[in-house]
Amino acid sequence: MSNFKKLAGQTAVYGLSSILGRSINFLMIIVYTEYLTKEAMGSFTSIYALIGFMNIVFTYGMETTFFRFATGKNLDANKVYNSTQSLLVTSTLLLGTGLYLMAPLLADWLEYPGQAYLFRWTALILSFDAILAIPFAKLRLENKALIFAGTKIFNIFLNIFFNLLLIVGFPYLIANGIISEGFLGYRSDWGVEYILLSNLLANGLIIPFVWWKAGFFQFKLEGTIIKPMWTYSIPLLFMGLAGVTNELFSRFLFEYVLPPNFYAGLSAREAGGVFGANFKLAIMMNLVIQAFKYAAEPFFFKQAQDKNSPLLYAKVMHVFILFCTVLMIAISVNLEWMGPLFLRQSGYEEGLFIVPTLLMGYMLLGIYFNLSIWFKITDQTKYSFWITLVGAILTIAIIFVFVPIWGYLGGALSTISCYFVMCLLCYLYGQKYYPIPYQTGKGIFYLLFSFSLSYLGFYLNIGIPVLDFFLRNSLILIYIGLIFFLEKEQIMAYFPKSKKY
């Protein structure tokens, strides 16, 4: 129980940085949809999907590899840190330079003529992220959660500050004659440019601090350390590539697959902006998963040698499902007022109906992360490649087949379908090679029942706003009551029995 409480405590701390920080970042969707055009939102959606994909290439599974080898019995953690960071810095210089030089070709290929600078900035953002990855991982491994969380929050506040300054502040000052157009090279016709520039500045400014707190590394490439790490990480690279294909390609490909004039009055890029903005509403589920991942990955590796670890992993999975299903219902039943609150311009509400599906997709991603522990601690990462490759192929197939037919819904189905298949395959192989006593029947019941309640609450409409609000939110209470009824014995086990005198 103490281990479980430790994981919960660290998840809470990491959650502070992930949920608080990203929630503030999430609120920027209000600014973007208020001040930027739908076309700029479409560019934002597709370019950041590309960044998410390339980020995997730049780090190629080295975070998980670092945890695996730094916690090993026969290796010195500092030597592993030096070798891993040295390798990443070297590869980042090569990859970053290559992408920087290819920027004009990328701009033409992705239909951004004359905007090669967008992809040069993208190369710099990716490079900064890569050289920060292992120092951040070292802070997690050393349980320096407060430093990790504080730095992440500061980084996000910097990003928000630059966004507000460039997207809101400067236009206000120009409109009121305080500064003139062209001040410091400012251009009023830029949109997504200022999102990228803000990201670049915020990430670059924290590099010295993170390196200082994690410990400056010595440049050493020790073959005896790097060779087995490389063997371990390569399957994780392909797993990561397939994984971001599943997560991001629906947003990246959407504007290129959607037929012209599919949505009246919207270009394909503008429709991609609507799709991407509604995807953002599901980010609250992803925030929980990210916070959990930060705490769980090093925790799972440290507990791997304990004979009771399978039982602990099963308990973690069950609590994860319970918490996330409640969150899914809570968001889904309140989308009627949350949508207009966050998506400021008209037209974005057309995509709200896909949000519950996206929430379930993100939850399945979190479940997959729980399930995937078996091949990480048994060094069977080759299975990760095949499982995520199946998911990636399914994602791309569904996008090309169903987006031209169903538009936004086709894109959402690509997310939920691929993660369902990945979970199924990972569970079946995991139970064969590393059995974990998951409460599978209960888990499936909670997933299906909560998903049904989510759409019931979304479409519930009596016609009286106040009554609709209370009826929808009563579904949350009904579901929580069901949990207490079915989990009564487990819940009571957490409370010590009172002594009788």
Image (cartoon, rainbow, N blue to C red):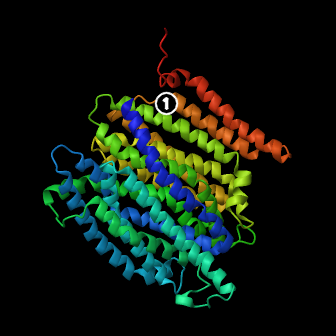
Quarter of the picture containing the N terminus is: top left
Which residue is nearer to you in this view: 121 or 413? 121
- Image location of residue 481, percent across then percent down: 64, 28
Task: For residue 417, say whether it is visible.
Answer: no
Looking at the picture, does residue 373 appear above or below residue 435?
A: below
Which residue is nearer to you in this view: 371 or 183? 183
- Image location of residue 182, percent across then percent down: 57, 91
Q: Residue furthest top?
A: 501
Left or right: where 367 falls relative to 56: right
- Image location of residue 177, percent across then percent down: 67, 89
Q: Amino acid at mark 1?
A: Thr
- Image location of residue 140, percent across then percent down: 34, 51
The residue sitting at 48% across, 45% down in the picture is 366
Which residue position holds label 1?
A: 440
The residue sitting at 52% across, 37% down in the picture is 321
The residue sitting at 74% across, 41% down in the picture is 472
Looking at the picture, does residue 157 appear above or below residue 302?
A: below
